[in-house]
Amino acid sequence: MVNQKGGVGKTTVVLGLASAAAHRGIETLVVDIDPQGNATTGLGVFEPTRSIDSVLIEERPGGINSVVETTGWTDDSGRRPLVAASSPALAAREPQLASDPLGAQDRLSVAMQGCSVPLVLVDCPPSLGLLTINALFAVDAVLVVTEPGAWAVDGVGRMLQTIDRIRTRRPDGGPEVSGIAVNRLGRTRDGRYWHEQLDSAYPEKCLPPVHLRAAVSEAAAQSRPIHSLGSRAGAAEAAGEFDVLLDILLRPVTADAPPTTESLPEGDI
Ligand SMILES: Nc1ncnc2c1ncn2[C@@H]1O[C@H](COP(=O)(O)OP(=O)(O)OP(=O)(O)O)[C@@H](O)[C@H]1O
Ligand SMILES: [Mg+2]
């Protein structure tokens, strides 16, 4: 999940997808490479004993396995995800990575060699620095997360250009762009307008939106999966929207049908 812009919902979408995967029994690893550590906290890990920072210090093939731990989500909400936790030390790691004369853009990719978890979700910081670049060198697919707001079209465009540049440098031509996740879509005219702008700028890339719902921010604040909020107003609708995004992410890479952009029925907002 990427966007150089802050606060658009990258972490929220990571947590929503992790919740959808847990609910379906899919083993999932969340890699939190944002020094803010919001995904780590959202997964109920408050004092991680290990962190992803330690495998970015130098090239450590397969190193991710040594930092993976179980999250604080309970088993009754499905298969409990794993996390490679963030650390505030990541903020200082980024400038240090930049000083590697051979380039340090593939440390995460090297660390993930041999990782056997079927679904890995990477939460990126709000910048195009070396942490995000490491994620783009490591993943098979990217979800660009945005809000339907002013300059969203420009911001997404810059992100897509950066991904294109990575694709020319990666031997396998990756990562694929799974699509643009339009998050926090409200019922305002403004939201609808900017959503339409995004849809017409990227008609084949815009995915079914995730609506603005109090249940979504509550789940994150309580470090609980959205699928476990039960009858809380809006929770089932929000969970359903993340289910749809997960289906799209898990599509076979060879699928040629573009995703549909029809909205799901709106619940409580
Ligand atoms: N669909 C939604 N409905 C309600 N609140 C939302 C929704 N999406 C995100 N939020 C809230 O918006 C805030 C920002 O979201 P989030 O932290 O996921 O963004 P981010 O892109 O990860 O931010 P950063 O760039 O700082 O990492 C959070 O308080 C979150 O709970
Ligand atoms: Mg975040």
Image (tube, rainbow, N blue to C red):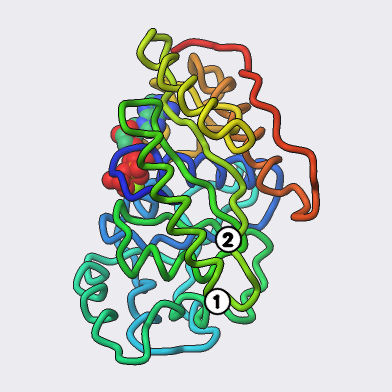
Left or right of 34, for residue 144: right
Numbered badge on residue 268: none
Residue shown at the point (52%, 76%) measured from the top left? 109
| Residue of label 1 | 112
Q: Are marks 1 and 2 in contact (CB under 8 Å)?
A: yes
Of mark 1 and mark 2, the one earlier in the sequence is: 1
Measured Cα–Cα span from mark 1 to mark 2: 10 Å
Left or right of 92, for residue 216: right
Instruction: Give the SS element for disc 1.
Output: loop
The percent position of residue 265, horizontal first and vertical second, equals 62, 12
> Of 192 and 43, which appears nearest the observer?
192
Whether residue 269 is visible to the viewer of this picture, yes or no, is yes
| Residue of label 2 | 120
Q: Classify mark 2: residues with Cα within 10 Å, few (<14), some (14-19) or many (20+).
A: many
Left or right of 77, for residue 102: left
Instruction: Give the SS element for disc 2.
Output: strand
Q: Amino acid at mark 1?
A: Met
The correct choice, above or below, for 51 with respect to 179 in the image is: below
Left or right of 252, for residue 32: left
Ligand 1 is located in which of the four quadrants? top left
The correct choice, above or below, for 30 with respect to 167 in the image is: above
The percent position of residue 3, horizontal first and vertical second, equals 38, 48
> Of 199 and 232, which appears nearest the observer?
199
The correct choice, above or below, for 90 with respect to 23 in the image is: below
The percent position of residue 235, horizontal first and vertical second, equals 52, 22
Res 240 → quadrant = top right
Q: Amino acid at mark 2?
A: Val
Which quadrant does the C terminus fall into? top left
Residue shown at the point (64%, 58%) measured from the top left? 119
Residue shown at the point (36%, 42%) measured from the top left? 155
Res 56 → quadrant = bottom left
Q: What number of labels is visible?
A: 2
